[in-house]
Image (cartoon, rainbow, N blue to C red):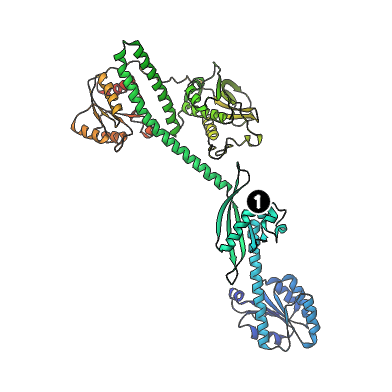
Amino acid sequence: MTAGMTNNATTSILRGTILAVDDEPDILVALEDLLEDEYRVLTTSRPAEALEMIASEPDIDVILSDQRMPGLTGDALLAQAREISDAQAILLTGYADISAVVSALNRGGITGYVTKPWDPSLLRNAVRAAHERHRLARELATERALLRGLLDHSGDAIAFKDAQGRYLRLNARMATRLGASSAESCLGRREAEVAGPASEAAEAADLAAIASGAPTETTVASGPEAAPTWNHVTRVPIRDATGAVVNLAVIERDVTEQRLLETRLRQADKMQALGTLAGGVAHDFNNLLTAILGSLELAQPKVAGDARLSRLMGNATQAAQRGAALTKRLLTFSHRRELQARTVDLNAVIRGMDDLLGRSLGGFVQVERHLDDDLWPARVDPDQLELAILNLCINGRDAMPEGGVVALSTRNETVRTSADPNLKPGDYAVIAIRDTGTGIPPEILGRVFEPFFTTKGVGQGTGLGLAMVFGLVQQSGGTIRIESEVGHGTTVLLYLPRSHEAVAAAPVAASAPAPAPRRARVLVVDDDPQVRHVTASFLNGFGYDEAEVPSGEAGLARLEAERFDLVVADLAMPGMSGLDLAEAVRQRWPALPFLLVTGHAEAARIPADFSVLEKPFPSADLAARVAALLAPEG
């Protein structure tokens, strides 16, 4: 029967659990009295019940069993117990039963024996030793299980080596990295013996870590130079009780994706910096163009009688206007904004890119156009469409390192049925961009529109271009298709839904400045003296009285001292910007009209209720805007 449990379960586990089995109740009482101060003691007089208790009590550390018991002898009991428990076993026997001890030892059922009558001190010491062995065995088994779980389930390649660099233990991932058939085939061998001479550098790093006795971390590349695999390697020397380094743990983590993400982030940062730079350059260039175009316009009447000078000034004006168009594209590139879709003539967009494509693709690429004269209009952001076409043409150029042809064509297509869920039935205007380059392998053709995916080398592309084109076409209600054959080039097709609205007319500049609706005083605020002078000269020619100041602070002071009917101010000025000045004027003189002039992408943050004129501007545009602002009071 079961008897004698001491304290609660948690305390008993910490103290250890002893199971005593003897058919004589007096002996069980004696064993309990002897051991209960140190252990939780379970007792039973029936071997069958003892086996049931062993099966239901996994925390039993030591089994004490008498040899001579009815039904089942002690050596047989302990042999069966060994099959279901890792508890240490001690056989209690008389001198006449020494043969039973030998039998039990041979069967692996016991780890020790004590003769009857026992010496209490000897028995207590035997139990203590058995309990300690069981505790250490359990701890070792736990550590082995934890290590095996770590090795088997870690995403890292892990190995343990001895001081000579021979593998003691490693997981399957490390074996795979070494090119071995199994982890077991690597045991007792150095890395160079398994992976070949290419591992000599790794072995040298191992020996250096062992010699230094300090953990080390390195990142190494392997594989082809065009697509290397990066591994972060940690080496941890392991010391024995005396402090000597006896083993080395090596942990290798694949950080290729992380390195790629870092590279892409750097490329994205470069793109953002380039966009910011483009915006700044465009702003300064627009100021120059405003001064140039304005000065040419002001000087044109003075040479009206000289045909040669008039022709030269006309040429200069046309060149400056082409520069203004290129600058506008720079601003579009640098300025992230929502799509501003309108119904456009796609052929006109493509024809208007002649200069841009010629300068971007270089002299080794021939540009061909095959445009359908009856092409349907489409509703799309023309500036973003230009960037999309430019991006695709540059991709074509990059696929033709020895030069070739980029062909742009347009056509109408009616889709009645389609297996492509992104291409709905309907009428589409189709733009095709074809190159005669190297083509795209079939295995990666389906990934080319993924963000950050690129087939270009490190530092040569962000992997965002085609993804941005895909996003533009999808937001416009269309889709994109790509056809490619290795060695024969690539064709990208942009499907844009047909628009039944009239093509939005491009704003036409007035042929002559509008006359002043009334006499008015205009304050011109600009930090660039040339732009300020041209603007003031235009206003004077329109019939207005103008005054000039070089900063927002000076403009505010002038408004405090004098009365003006209109303020014309540059947006980007040091100190108080034009927008800051406009808001201050609106608060203090809410009825005073205000015109912001800008040549910078920052125009996007100007509230919609402010009047804005973009640089460079002809005099007629300035006159029309000023007249409109002054007309309500005329």
Seen as rendered, the residue at the extreme left is 561
User: In x, y percent, where is residue 56?
Assistant: 69, 71
Give the quadrant of the C terminus.
Answer: top left
Amino acid type shown at disc 1: Ala
User: In x, y percent, where is residue 1?
Assistant: 71, 80
409 versus 126 height, above or below: above
Q: Is residue 71 visible?
A: no
Q: Is residue 309 visible?
A: yes
Q: Nearer the viewer, residue 587 or 331?
A: 331
- Residue at left 59%, top 72%? 241
- Where is mark 1, residue-wise? 198
204 versus 139 height, above or below: above
Residue 513 figure quarter: top left
Q: Nearer the viewer, residue 420 or 348?
A: 348
Residue 204 figure quarter: bottom right
Residue 374 figure quarter: top right
